[in-house]
Amino acid sequence: MAAPFPDFEPARSMIIILDETVTEEQIKHVASKVEQLGLQTSISRGTYRTVIGVIGDETKLQSAPLAAIPGVAEVLPVMPAYKLASKQAHPKPTIIEVGPVKIGGGHMAMIAGPCAVESEERMESIAKSVRAAGANIFRGGAFKPRTSPYSFQGLGEDGLKILRDVGARHGMPVVTEVVDPRNVELVCEYADMLQLGARNMQNFVLLTEVGRTNKPVLLKRGMSATVADFLMSAEYIMAQGNSNVVLCERGVKGFDPATRNTFDVALVPQIHKLSHLPIIVDPSHATGRPDLIPACALAGVAAGADGVHIEVHDKPEEAMSDGPQALLPKQYAELMDQIRKVGAAVGKQIG
Ligand code: PEP
Ligand code: MN
């Protein structure tokens, strides 16, 4: 496995919290168990609790059931389980490059396009308008993960060709979803960035396969994924050697059918606190409502998002998927003007 960061060192320690009633003999026993594994210990005795700090490669402890030793109350890793994705591994924000577009560290990705790749003519007119508005990455799904098997599933390889050609004609790299590990190689031939959708956030075979490529990945948050689940999925990709991961908040399942999902804007500053990876927002899938998308997009940027992902269609009533949530090109252009202003206020520019 290639080391994704030259300055990354494996986690170094763990803390063992002992029971309030632990005896001196038990403390010695726990320490000797740890030392037998080739690790060092440092014992600190507080008024109520004694804790043992473990110094050394924590991976040696993974198969040792320390919590089962009498006198041990809790075993806490000091490093999070998502090591490569964590801020500890790489304190500065990572900047991901998709063709000439930079994402992260003050640069914003403006990803726009229809939900699904449609005819070449339709893609041309949408690409032209979003490019003129300032979008820098063109999107469209050629393989669609639809809730119903009877819904339009995408144009497949023909769609990939259209997306690539139209993107190239308008000077935009392209992002498209890969839903099947067997298609990763095919999608890599056409796409500049691979999208891993909400429904596949924990498809570990697909994450691993995508991690073996060198393509930037747009990883969308699963509909009920916690922050830790999300970062662990990024870790799957990174553990294979691909550290070009951009996260995307696209709403989580809520209780209120008034919106398609619930937009979790707090995820943006949380990710920035825990991880060096860029995070963008997708208010289209988060709300499913064109009347709410602009405000949520701006809220995401104000919260520090490294980009905005929006579905745009010039004939939403004829769209093959997600038509009702598409912004019209004119609405998108107006929103882009506002995004530039809010971005400038928080020190970000369109990358
Ligand atoms: C999409 O981007 O069209 C899509 C299917 O998104 P998500 O995986 O977030 O539902
Ligand atoms: Mn969609």
Image (cartoon, rainbow, N blue to C red):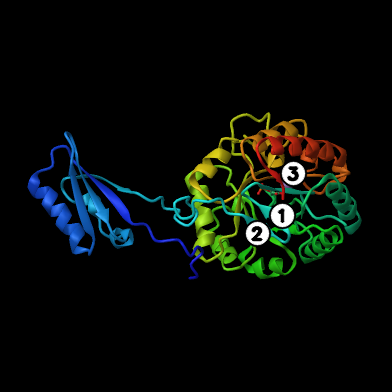
Figure quadrant of residue 155? bottom right
Q: For disc 2, does the CB lie below 8 Å from ligand 1?
A: no
Mark 1 is surrounded, within 10 Å at the Cα level, by few (under 14), some (14 to 19) or many (20 or more) other residues, namely many
Label 2 close to label 1 by CB (< 8 Å): yes
Mark 2 is surrounded, within 10 Å at the Cα level, by few (under 14), some (14 to 19) or many (20 or more) other residues, namely many
In this orientation, which residue lies closer to the viewer: 60 or 65?
60
Figure quadrant of residue 282? top right
Residue at x 87% of width, y 57% of height:
119
**How far apart, in angstroms, are the residues tagged by discs 2 and 3?**
20 Å
Q: Earlier in the sequence, mark 2 or mark 1?
A: 1
Q: Is residue 85 above or below residue 282?
A: below
Residue type, label 3: Ile
> Element at badge 2?
loop
In x, y percent, where is residue 28? Answer: 11, 52
Residue at x 18% of width, y 63% of height:
36
In x, y percent, where is residue 297? Answer: 70, 37
Q: Earlier in the sequence, mark 3 or mark 1?
A: 1
In x, y percent, where is residue 347? Answer: 66, 40
Q: For disc 1, does the CB lie below 8 Å from ligand 1?
A: yes
Q: Is residue 194 visible from the viewing direction of this image?
A: no
> Element at badge 1?
loop
> Element at badge 3?
strand
Does 196 sit left or right of 38 as displayed? right
Residue at numbered disc 1: 144
Residue at x 81% of width, y 47% of height:
134
Q: Earlier in the sequence, mark 2 or mark 3?
A: 2
In x, y percent, where is residue 112? Answer: 77, 48
Q: Which mark is residue 179?
A: 2
Residue type, label 2: Val
In this orientation, which residue lies closer to the viewer: 175 or 243?
243
**How far apart, in angstroms, are the residues tagged by discs 3 and 1?**
16 Å
Q: Which mark is residue 310?
A: 3
